[in-house]
Image (tube, rainbow, N blue to C red):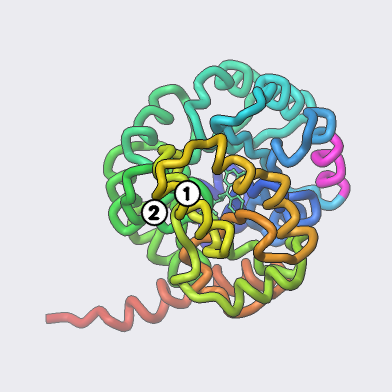
Amino acid sequence: MLRTRLTDLLGIRHPIIQGGMQWVSRAELVAAVSNAGALGILTALTHPTPEGLVREIQKTRELTDQPFGVNITILPTLKPVPYEEYVQAAIEAGVKIVETAGRNPEPFLPALKKAGVVVIHKCTSVRHAVKAEKIGCDVVSIDGFECAGHPGEDDVPGLVLIPRTADTVNIPIVASGGFADGRGLAAALALGADGINMGTRFLATREAPIHERIKELLVEADERQTTLILRSLRNTARVFRNRVAEEVLRLEGEGAGIETIGPLVSGKRGERVWSEGDPEAGIWAAGLVVGLIHDVPPVAELVERIVGEAESIIRQRLPGMLVSG
Ligand SMILES: Cc1cc2nc3c(=O)[nH]c(=O)nc-3n(C[C@H](O)[C@H](O)[C@H](O)COP(=O)(O)O)c2cc1C
């Protein structure tokens, strides 16, 4: 077993988090992750209304009695989102862990803290990690350039971002982006993190509620199969490189704006990738870590394997390198 400040604070057995994933982190995956001793996180905005989120929280509770969280992603959207209502719904449903991401979560902190919620803020730069600590977040999850979804605009990979963050903030740190196995977990701990957060790796698990064809594609793909889109709009996203992503890049090269690009990157089209198994149906997030995914195990087996491998690296491989003299 690996005990860290993160396992103590969240009351989980293993220092592993499944980050919020739009459309994907639903009750079945989240409960499987939490039952495996890691932390599963639902995604609020997967549900069109706060009531829908509450139903998903209840469903998750029927599947696990272990801690789980809710992700609130604050990003620029065409249609205004009632964030406060989602936050309130999560609090009233008794959620004790919230992962915020995107923009500054400060407006929601008073309500969350009053309700005794542990707030994990996920961000992509040291300056935002410092700010998160200052405004009272309990944990900072630091997403490196490798990550699926939004890596920010600074392009700093985890190998620098994690130790820089560890040197700068005092609250527990979760290393995110590019983690898939025990080598990554051991490395993250060595770099000063208290645990890891994974997204893409959890897509390729038996319990992930996505089409089998996409899981197979993740196994087949290598680390060159992702690309960064929407940089021209300063809303960079790392996604699987398909024809839609290439079309977006072409339009960006021509100086197109969100009016032209919007329909291509719509959430509705992306959702069809997961439900219909057509990898070309829309844009879908995937990280560089696709290069490290070679199978589709049950979540419990994956978590055990990652922890077992990290322990053996720490207990055997590294001490075996120590020589006196
Ligand atoms: C399909 C998918 C959807 C995601 N959706 C969200 C989201 O809605 N909100 C969020 O904060 N992060 C989202 N992420 C990012 C993950 O929570 C996590 O930070 C990221 O995947 C870590 O990088 P990794 O994929 O290399 O493990 C998503 C990731 C994936 C793969």
* Residue at the (17%, 80%) spot, across then down: 324
* Residue at the (82%, 33%) spot, across then down: 54
| Quarter of the rendering containing residue 154 | top left
Dot label at residue 145 = 2
> Element at badge 1?
helix
Residue 252 position in % (x across, y down): 44, 47
Tell me the chief SS of the magenta region: helix
Q: Is residue 248 above or below residue 71?
A: below
- Whether residue 311 can be seen here: no
Question: Image quadrant for the N terminus?
Answer: bottom right
Q: Is residue 58 above or below residue 117?
A: below
Residue 255 position in % (x across, y down): 41, 42
* Residue at the (52%, 64%) spot, across then down: 241
For discs 2 and 1, the disc positioned in front in the rendered view: 1
- Tell me the crowding category of disc 2: few under 14, some 14 to 19, or many 20 or more residues within 10 angstroms, Cα based: many
**Amino acid beneath label 2:** Phe
Dot label at residue 251 = 1
Where are the magenta residues, as a range? Answer: 55-62
Mark-to-mark CA distance, 2 and 1: 23 Å
Question: Image quadrant for the C terminus?
Answer: bottom left
**Amino acid beneath label 1:** Leu
How many numbered marks have been drawn onto this rendered protein structure? 2
Dot label at residue 186 = none
Viewed as shown, does residue 59 lie left or right of 118?
right
* Residue at the (72%, 21%) spot, across then down: 85
Residue 12 position in % (x across, y down): 63, 51
- Whether residue 266 can be seen here: yes
